[in-house]
Amino acid sequence: MGLLSLLRRLRKSGGEARILILGLDNAGKTTILRKLSDEDITTTTPTQGFNIKSILHNGFKLNVWDIGGQKTIRPYWRNYYENTEALIYVVDAADRKRVDEAGYELNEILGEDKLATVPLLVFANKSDLLQAQSADDIAESLSLFNIKDRPWQIQACSAKDGTGLEEGLRWVVKQVK
Amino acid sequence: MNTAYLKRCADEDRRAKIAAGFTIDGMNMRDASTGEMLWEMNSWPSDWHVAEIQARVPARILQCPVVSRELTFSSVEKVANLRCEHRVYLDGAPDPIEVWDFDFGFVMPGSRNTWQTTVEAAGGEKMLSPTEASGRVTVRTKFTDGDATIVESAVRVFYDND
């Protein structure tokens, strides 16, 4: 499981790809990234900058960028858009009060020139929680069905137990040319 | 005074400020196939700018098919164009056995960041034995802003039998 096994299956060689992970604070971006490498997720703290995972396989480098989601950090997001080949947007599906805020920020991102046509995966995270909304409901709240300028996908997941991560990632890696 | 001179002074000023507020906070190594932490160092000696740091790592790390190495660093100042040159040397050999250069680009002021690289082992007869390699492997990391060096660090790795 995880990023490396995914890369092995890709049979790519040479080159480099950049995947960007964004989302509100406490959505679970860093936890997803750690879970994908089977790392301890209990020590995760709010990201005050960025976390990058660079994986090399067969001369092919995959760089995954996870940028902090706190409100004060969001104005810096735009510094990391360049050369992005796929965007992962993480939403806390159990935080009903902040779905609108998540939708607003996503809308801003999708309007950026540097991210035009970049494929989008939305992770509806924390799906293991009782109060979590379904992926369909989240897609509706985020107006994903109106997106016409890029491929997109939504995937329910739980960063805590790993459910759905692999499926989502497989879609993302397929989009990377 | 000409403007080129003034600009140079301002550049140097800014670099000194970046360097003063830039720290490497920690480093760790993991078995990347299980995520298990094999070694971590979360407090660096205050004289790390000049001294070589010694890492005592369990010898079984050399048996791991995939190892990940993670660096945590902080910056008080904003950095426009951070770059890192990461080299692993086996002493006696002038050429590094592993080279990894990375462009971070923009670094937020007041930020704490991590960079993890995952590399597959050479495998087969290229694998080093712990006794052979202990104390001879150094990991050198140099952070730069544009062409200017911000900090350099060296970690010498010793392999201990568990």
Image: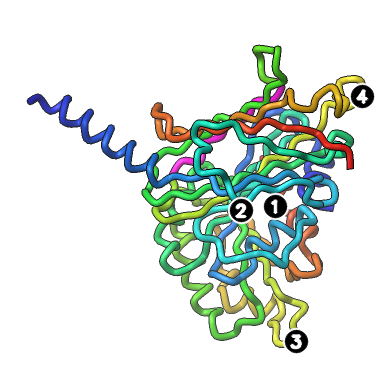
Number of the label disc, if any, that sits on residue A130: 3
Q: Quadrant of residue A168?
A: bottom right
Asked if disc 4 and disc 3 are in contact, CB closer than 8 Å, the reply is: no
Q: Is residue B64 visible?
A: no
Type of the residue with mark 2 = Pro
Number of the label disc, if any, that sits on residue B124: 4
Alpha carbon separation for disc pair 4 and 2:
40 Å
- Labels 3 and 2: the sequence-earlier one: 2
Q: Is residue A51 visible?
A: yes
Q: Chain of mark 2?
A: A
Alpha carbon separation for disc pair 1 and 3:
27 Å
Quadrant occupied by the N terminus of chain B: top left
Alpha carbon separation for disc pair 3 and 2:
30 Å
Q: Secondary structure at mark 4?
A: helix
Q: Residues within 10 Å of mark 3 (few under 14, many from 20)?
A: few
Type of the residue with mark 4 = Gly
Q: Main secondary structure of the magenta part?
A: strand
Label 1, on which residue? A172
Asked if disc 1 and disc 2 are in contact, CB closer than 8 Å, the reply is: yes
Q: Tell me which segment is drawn in magenta.
A: B97-106
Type of the residue with mark 1 = Val
